[in-house]
Amino acid sequence: MKKGCALLMTCLLFALAQTESLAAALERSTVPVSETWNLTDLYATKADWETEKTEWAGKIDHIKTYQDKLSESADQLLACLEFTSNLSREFGQLYSYASMLADQDTRESAPQAMKQELQQLATNFQALASYIEPEIVAMKPETIAAFLKEEPGLEVYRHYLDNLQRQREHTLTAAEEKIVAQAGLMSGAAAQIFNIFSNADLPYPQVTLTTGETVLLNPSGFGRYRAVTNREDREKVFNAFFGALNTFRRTFGTQLDGNLKKDLFYARVRNYPSTLAAALDANNIPVEVYHSLIQNVNENLDTFYRYLQLKQRMLGVDTLKYSDLYAPVVADIELNYTLDQAQEMILEAMAPLGGEYVQILQKAFNERWIDFHPTLGKRSGAYSNGSVYDVHPYILMNFNGQYNDVSTLAHELGHSLHSFFANKTQPFPTADYPIFVAEVASTLNEALLIHKQLELIQNDGARLSLLMNYLDGIKGTVFRQTQFAEYELRIHEAVEKGIPLTGDKLTEIYADIVRTYYGHDRGVCQVDDLYTIEWAYIPHFYYNYYVYQYATSFTASTALSQKILSGDSEAVQKTIAFLSAGGSDYPIELLKKAGVDLTTSAPFAMTMQAMNQTMDEIERILDSQGR
């Protein structure tokens, strides 16, 4: 079954927020237990986990008993699907425990070994179960229809079975599917090499700032020091960091080229006309949605240029440079919050979503669903893990007390409540929601949070900070992610045409796109030659057409938030129904039921309207201050 096999093969998809831990890490033993997640909700001890893992591994071979029998009867088909679904359900809990245990202290090797063992078991099961989909696809549609009518238990698999029939021309024979499954052992090599090289082996530079402080510019350090106030320091940081990447552009180019060829292999072996069609077909997303996003953004670059010119005005510089983009534009405004304040802010902001939504948020805070603080060895960033169907979602945070941390917490809680409602409402086979809609709930929470804060804060300086935070979010989520999406499309198309992609060629393609988006030739923002190596820094280019979904989800959540904040009670009901629907339908249809049609340009237009209205207010404040 696809849901089971996909979960077993990919070993969970976490919703990631790309934030870095900037505060000094604490010893985990010094953190109040109430502010750490409670993994004993999953397994009381590691020994209990080991017992469950051994039992799970002992069940794998049973899947072979259904081979060549799925078309014999509705009972046989149901038994196979239920067996696979139950294994996937159990695996989600096993892997979540090992993975989160590893993330809370990456220095410990034992949890890493636990993860690796499960990944190997998942690959083994994937190969053993590879006959399932070809057998179902080979069945006549009328046979499946008769089975559904005969056996009520198959109803929860209707969407899955319909989707397989829709994709039948891309499903291979059982023998071929087994080979493709085994190829999974190698297919992640380029991404794994990139991860290790970028995070462990690349000799990142150190620079000395005008303050006299010498800092290491690894990815975390770059994320921090690119935003320093002093412009000379920012340029020094950019030049050193991108200079280091450029030294290894041939290596980065070879890695990314290998990953692109992996995508091409899977597209061709499954008879898709392009890598884009292959990537989007899994969720039945029309390729027109991808192309329309890129077209809409390019047609609205003047709005983005207005944002960049506003940033230039607030920085007070004659020429805006690419190295200025992360610089603080509101001086002497420090918005800091305690953990208790952050929780209260979120509870108050989410009130428009209803009492049940707020009650679940309180459970998350009170029942230790969240690991809040940066501790020594802990994984950086933030994510929500909603893969434990029978327990509750978990959140990893690195909370540092800034507004961005509060917003990130609201974001991850959006993911968690999406998982909570889906797991509560849907049977396991339809609970897992598609990646395409994953960011809707999270960015909706961010929108509600900033709206509430703007209601409460009247100080012009603080309002400017929040308004620019909102604009920076649109910049990073809509424009920057679409820029990445266009780059992904261009480099995949190059591979499909047989064009060699060296590090220099990848830089050339990136330079053309980034300079168009930032108005380099129009004098809006200067993008130096060296900075066009930036593609080598982006891990998302190894995710196979993933990033466009950040932009589409943001426009969808903007449309939803505007309806909710207008007092539309039906919009609230539709939003909760959307969260509860899980993966029971195709993502485009799920959003249509929520009142958002991403096959039209309306959600994008609403986002541009909100962006321009925000810039109108910022300009009014600046004019009143004589700036």
Image (tube, helix red, strand yellow):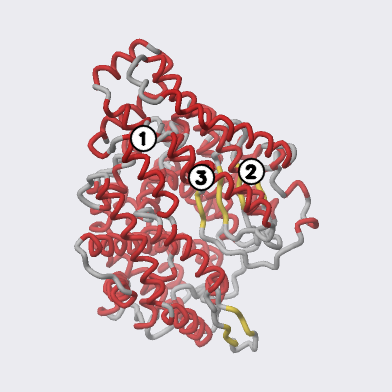
State the CA–CA distance, disc 2 to disc 3.
Answer: 12 Å
**Crowding near pointer 2: few (<14 within 10 Å), some, many (20+)?**
many
Q: Which residue is mark 1?
A: 590
Q: Write down the quadrant of residue 284 in the picture.
A: top left
User: In this rendering, is residue 536 above or below 137?
Assistant: below
- Can you give x and y, in whole percent of width and height, for residue 96 in the image? 60, 43
Q: Write down the quadrant of residue 608 in the picture.
A: bottom left
Q: Earlier in the sequence, mark 2 or mark 3?
A: 3
Q: Quadrant of the N terminus?
A: top left
Residue at x 34% of width, y 83% of height: 529
Q: Which mark is residue 97?
A: 2
The answer to whether residue 612 shows anywhere in this view is no
Q: Amino acid at mark 3?
A: Cys
> Which element is circle 2 on?
helix
Q: Earlier in the sequence, mark 2 or mark 1?
A: 2
- Can you give x and y, in whole percent of width and height, for residue 610 in the image? 37, 55
> Which element is circle 1 on?
helix
> Which element is circle 3 on?
loop
Q: Which residue is mark 3?
A: 11
Q: How many numbered marks have been drawn onto this rendered protein structure?
A: 3
